[in-house]
Image: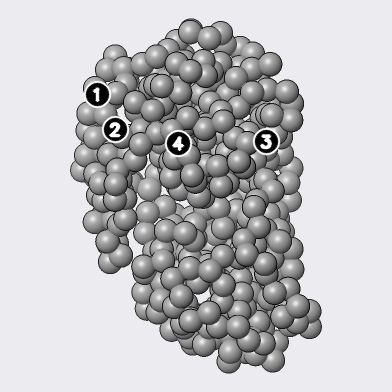
Amino acid sequence: MRRFLFVVPPLVGHINPAVAVAAELTGRGHRVAWAGLPGLVEELAGPGAEVHSCEAPLDLRRPPGLRGVAALRFLWQDFLGPLATAMAPGVERAVAAFRPDVLVADQQALAGALAAERLRIPYATSATTSAEFSGPLAGMPKVEEWIRGLLGELRGTIGDPSRTHDPRFSPDLVLAFTTTALTGECTAPAQTRFVGPALARRPEPEPFPWERLDPRRHTVLISLGTANTDTGDRFLTECAAAVRERARHVQAVIADPGGALDGTVGDTVLAVKRMPQLALLQRASAVVCHAGHNTVAESLLHGVPLVVAPIRDDQPVIAAQVTAAGAGIRIRFGRSDRHAIGAALDGVLTDPPYREAARRVQESFRAAGGAAAAAAHLEEFAASTRQGEPGKP
């Protein structure tokens, strides 16, 4: 039996794949613990999860209007950096209490990687988005230099100043929850293992009115993820209008946590605060989303083509991957109205190549192995190391 400590940020899309891998490891007889925000981790991993509490900055909300470089600056300067500093003491306490053989650090939970290198604990990286493998900062050398400077400051405070590698990439093992069928040719380091999406059973939200779905019509899922509630009212309203104009053959389930659609329940548009996404994907014909990695990966794992409207962060990169793979159509989040959204929907619903491309990615994802493959790589890594040995430089 080995001990694996998962260090995760307070982001649903980053915790869900780790939950699947943790469940697989537990099923194989290993012991798993978590370092993160207890309430969120317990909600997603289950009440029986062993969670070691970490602090987080009091306010991690991002101003809704930020885009481009301003959004990137906020991500690093006001989110990832402060989050790492706040989490670091909790991660160290978790290591002391749990004594892991391997620490599994999410790419955006930098405290995990930096604590592991300082405490000489072997660590693997959980890469829940493939954007970092696609050179997102190519052509922006000053921004890249600024980020390296921030990482250096964090390493000097909570890591090992003698190390020189990028802490977002373990020098020993990086688990990428995608495949090159979606990413295309990319700059992933040699220690990367592409395992495809990792899915686990999730707690059901409030009861869903399945009886309102008409099996004779296409079902479209529309979601902007959990971090874009403050920005999506106009877009969701236009999506609903586009669907209503196609009511003869299309119906939509819209994730509307902010209540922009006033809890609309009807024969054509069903707005809910939370949707059982994995269950709905089994009957969906298309997905409209912000190009968040988890939603894209889960949709393509079900062979469902997409309309992607990226907002910020890694989303433009993921959207570009979707269109390059031929599995969807990209539209502009800030400017697309019901006509543009409707035209894109018509395309992915009626043009066979989009669904054929989605199924090609689906086959690649399935072959990659998901949570079982990730767990096997972690077992192999743990077997090759001993507690207390430093990782490779």
Marks 3, 1: nearer the viewer: 3
- Looking at the rendered structure, the kind of residue marked 2 is Thr
Query: In the image as oriented, which residue stretches furthest toward the right?
Result: 216
> Label 1 belongs to which residue?
157
- Looking at the rendered structure, the kind of residue marked 1 is Thr
- Looking at the rendered structure, the kind of residue marked 4 is Gly
Marks 4, 2: nearer the viewer: 4
- Residues at marks 3 and 2, CA–CA distance in whole angstroms: 28 Å
Q: Is residue 309 visible?
A: yes
Lateral position of residue 331 relative to residue 300, left or right: left
Question: Which is nearer the N-term, disc 4 or disc 2?
Answer: 4
**Residue in the foreground of this view, choosing between 284 and 309:** 284
- Looking at the rendered structure, the kind of residue marked 3 is Ala
Q: Position of residue 67 (x, y in %)?
A: 29, 62
Q: Is residue 6 above or below residue 317?
A: above
> Label 3 belongs to which residue?
23
Question: Which is nearer the N-term, disc 1 or disc 2?
Answer: 2
> Label 4 belongs to which residue?
36
Question: Which is nearer the N-term, disc 3 or disc 4?
Answer: 3
> Label 2 belongs to which residue?
85
x 49%, y 57%: residue: 292
- Residues at marks 3 and 4, CA–CA distance in whole angstroms: 17 Å
x 69%, y 29%: residue: 26
Q: Secondary structure at mark 1?
A: helix
Q: Secondary structure at mark 2?
A: helix
